[in-house]
Amino acid sequence: QLVESGGGLVQAGGSLRLSCAASGRTFVTYSMSWFRQTPGKEREFVALSRSDGTTTYADSVKGRFAISRDSVKNSLYLQMNDLKPEDTAVYYCAATYLGGTWYGTYDFWGQGTQVTVSS
């Protein structure tokens, strides 16, 4: 089970830190990612943390967002800085053993947390 927290309302230029707490299994050997989705649009990749410690970011968030994980706490984080109105979405954490940035390969999903950025 994956449970996200940390979403909320923030002004443009502000920061938020999302957390994803995993339970029921360890995800140490899994790739874990953040996705986001707005109404009527397909789920969009945001950031990936692989089990070997490497990361990948969507171009739209490079330099502003940072993904990290704590294997001891079995948790995933997303530090979001310099937020923009277009970052407004429901953010989901997800895990896959296969890896990649396509949402279709992810087996485990959280319920999502709303991030709203006002202009």
Image: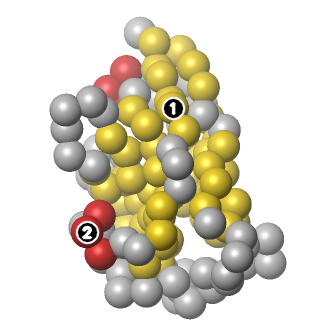
Residue under the point 31% across and 56% down: 45
Q: Quadrant of residue 71?
A: bottom right
Residue 53: image location, x then y, percent = 55, 81
Q: Taking 87 as reference, is 93 left or right?
A: right
Name the amino acid type tagged 2: Gly
Q: Quadrant of residue 80?
A: top right
Question: What numbered label is drawn on residue 104?
Answer: 2
Query: Does residue 51 lie above or below 111 as drawn?
Result: below
- Local packing at callout 1 (Cα closer than 10 Å; few below 14, some 14-19, many 20+) is some
Residue 117: image location, x then y, percent = 46, 20
Residue 113: image location, x then y, percent = 54, 39
Question: What numbered label is drawn on residue 97?
Answer: none
Badge 1 is on which residue? 114
Q: Taking 28 as reference, is 45 left or right?
A: left
Residue under the point 64% across and 54% down: 3
Looking at the image, can residue 48 be seen? yes
The quarter of the rendered structure image containing the C terminus is: top left
Residue nearest the observer in this picture, 119 or 102: 102
Secondary structure beneath dot 2 equals helix
Q: Mark 1–mark 2 contact, CB under 8 Å? A: no
